[in-house]
Image (cartoon, coloured by chain):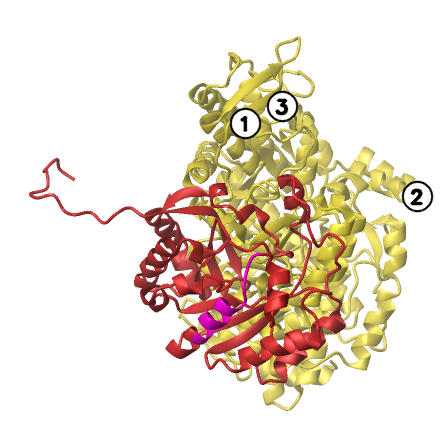
Chain colours: A red, B yellow
Amino acid sequence: MTGRPPVAPVAAPPVLHGAVHSWDTSVGVDGPGTRFVVFLAGCPLRCRYCHSPDTWYGRSGRRRTVDEMVTLATRYRRFVEVAGGGVTVSGGEPLLQPAFTGELLRRWHDLGLHTALDTSGFLGDRADEALLDATDLVLLDVKAGSPATYRRVTGTGRLAPTLRFARRLADRGTPMWIRYVLVPGLTDAPDEVARVADVAAGLATVERVEVLPFHRLGAHKYAQLGLAFPLADTAPPDPELLARVRGQFAERGLTVT
Amino acid sequence: MSGNQRTVDPWRGFRDGPWRETVDVADFVRRNHEPYTGDATFLTGPTARTLAVWDRLRAMFPEERRRGVYDVDAATPSTITSHAPGYVDRERELIVGLQTDAPLRRAIMPAGGLRMVETALRAYGREPDPRVHEIFTRYRRTHNDAVFDAYPESVLAARRSHVITGLPDAYGRGRIIGDYRRVALYGVDRLVEERRALKAALDDRRSTDDVIRDREELAEQIRALGELTEMAASYGFDISRPAATGQQAIQWLYFAYLAATKEQNGAAMSLGRTAGFVDVYLRRDIAEGRLDETGAQELVDDFVIKLRIIRFLRTPEYDQLFSGDPTWVTESLGGMGADGRPLVTRTTFRYLQTLYNLGPAPEPNLTVLWSPRLPDGFKRFCAQVSLDTSAIQYENDELIRPAYDDDAAIACCVSAMRVGRDMQFFGARANLAKALLYAVNGGRDELTGAQVAPPTPPVGGETLDYDEVLAAYDRTLDWLAQTYVDALNVIHHQHDRYAYERLEMALHDHPVRRFMATGVAGLSVAVDSLSAIRYGRVKVLRDDSGLAVDYAVEGEFPTYGNDDDRADEIAVWLVETFAAKLRRQRTYRDAELTMSVLTITSNVVYGTHTGNTPDGRRAGEPFAPGANPMNGRDTHGLVASALSVAKLPYDAARDGISLTGTVTPDGLGHTRAERIANLAGVLDGYTDAGGFHLNVNVLDRATLLDAMAHPERYPQLTVRVSGYAVNFVRLTPEQQRDVVSRTFHGSL
């Protein structure tokens, strides 16, 4: 703390910035237990059911350094450890900012925190091995079982990269939770679900499948942004439909929630 | 329950200790309790007998809700022995005793205040009794009259403007917990003997004010104990001797509690910490083959049925302040022993099981003293009960035990005390948000313009200057602390004289440690207002008389409830500063001054009487309850919000710091097992972080539907979906239906 100058200039690592939309604490919905969650801004997909269109564009985030987000997480470290949980990087699409996301995960992981990456996997190729080494759990949002439906759901995406990423995770032994958003009339066809279930059942590191019922809670965000909400008239799935789809996954021996 | 048990040694099989020689239930419990570390699978459901008794009462509840009160005895001022025995179902009841001669028939207690009695009677369509009126106006003064004779004008003005409010000056003060277990363990005769010895010891002292008062109080206590024996005898029980069985132990301690509720219409009539004590007796009965699990649960169920129908006659205005006819029959459960063993027994589980056997209910107010060190099976059962019923609250045993030892209990909501060793003078609360407006306005009320606090120069200028406001606030808080404690000293002096809790105090040590329990409301509004002044720009809008009546805020400012130190430090500063100012005041009977950050449901009424505030809150808008962040301003989730509250130092607010949290089942995880584990984890984390109290609401479908029909009752209902939160009542009806369907699709 004294004014002594450094003897020789130390090569400081470049300060990494990311576009961060927001941060939050949540329980049981962004991975196991109580978690500190950072939502990054920017996503290449335009899913029709997206409940956070405010995270689509990188410019809607604030520039934050990795240090800032690590410091914030350490505030919650004790709590999430005592409560049983960890930290999650979500979005937006975190792999749109792979360097920032990788560094964030690595720093959290070095602190001994349980880390989770919430991604569509569409940009899975951008996740390098170091990033995945620092990831204890991937929450992989598999949006459809067929390329056509994937395109219809996401507008801009392709299914293949997600499947490739999923196989890579399984091959390298990275645990994952498969997520599937159930939208009546869009992702509820039995054969669509069956394809996703087949994929999930073929991946050795899938610990569970989360079937997430579609909701319209993000509708007002579209209004605020002056956008039309494509599924404004779509109702959430009824309990019977939800039970059927969960059953399709369970039939293949998968743990379903 | 017949006479043949007279020959049985009531203390057979108990481990010896100092409790045999001196009245010391805490010692008895420590030596005789046996921790239970298993899960809830041993519990049994309700018997047909239990349901028959309960159904008889349940059939009466709708009528009571419709009329406000089911029945009142308007002619008989209540005393311990005023009413003939009453029964719910004499053939079936295992534990007997009612406040009057019939269930749900309320009594009048005019010694606290005749006006409250008569107003309440008229509100419920009953004529006050002329003879009662004559007695309590002509021959007998009431606490209420006596207080208003002695209030100084400054207190009256502060009371009128609601900067100090909720004062127990018109009815019983409550929040005193008799150690009702003493009656069961020792029998009344032994307690009378003890009181006589205590009184005799005062004979050598000179007859000063204090000594005279102590002698008179002890004489009154002895008289009350005699009446207690008489009341029990009218039900056919001889409680002069110790209880010899589990059934007797519950019956004896219930009689003692019942007698207290016949004598006092206290704001909160809490029960104490009885489960571990009762467990010693039930365990012995089971070992002796006298009782099985079903029988043990039946006794607890029957006891809890009685606690659920404790009733007091109160005015509609009182109910507006504290909605739902509350009695705060608080029972403290669990916690850790000073020896490191959990104070969790099978009977702790049995008390919680009543929420299943009899269905959820707010009373008795089951309060779990939580520690991360509690046995896992118990933690999970608590979390499960919270998920299923939202009926229990949690307090931090790791804060309470060091401060009040391991035989502490909660009075009312968050006020911890050593059972039978401490009592408190309940003091409602002062409005910190309104006080801030007084500071800006030089002591004038922002709604009426009246000069309430002494005139000081108003804070000038177009834009509020933080340092100037802070200096003015500091002066206002000095005045507020002084006026507030002045009011409390008057109230409790007069309550001791005119509505003394003879029986409850007979079940305390002598001398007793006394607390003067003050409280604050509007913390988050005051903090956010100060934050707005400090970090944003707050322009003052004045009326023609120069009174600041509104504020325009520009710029962003940090708000309390987001684990942001900039705002949270203001909250800590305010709590510590006001507590220190209060502690500087001289208190009646040299009571130790404590403070709570608690409003219960009065946050709504406080808001009604407070004008526009610099944080952007509009006049009349409710405050957040207790120490909660302002509704909707905690935007980073439950944990961040809880951590802000956990920063408030318990040492400055030893009467408790209240946080109410609302979560949906989905906000705790996808499966029931996960939700249970996650909620227990959150409680561990919050306790570990130093949080004091958490009211957990896990909302069910019925609650959300009710919130749609009555949005005004749910101002802070937050619905959380993955990484996303919405204020439920601000959603359109269609969106609300969406949430209702979504929330419950995911659950069982």
Give the image location of residue B150, x and y in percent: 65, 27
Give the image location of residue B443, x and y in percent: 57, 18
Q: Nearer the N terminus, badge 2 or badge 1?
A: 2
For the point 87% across and 51% down, the residue is: B72
Q: Which residue is mark 3?
A: B152
Taking B474 as reference, is B183 above or below it? below
Q: Which residue is mark 2?
A: B125
Give the image location of residue B533, x and y in percent: 49, 25
Helix, strand or loop status at disc 1: helix
Q: Can see residue A105? A: yes
Q: Which residue is mark 1?
A: B480
Which residue is at the front of the view, B392 or B547? B547
Among the 4 quarters of the image, the one containing residue A182: bottom right
Which numbered marker is on residue B412?
none
Q: Nearer the N terminus, badge 3 or badge 1?
A: 3
Helix, strand or loop status at disc 3: loop
**What range is drawn magenta here?**
A156-167
Taking B495 as reference, is B97 above or below it? below
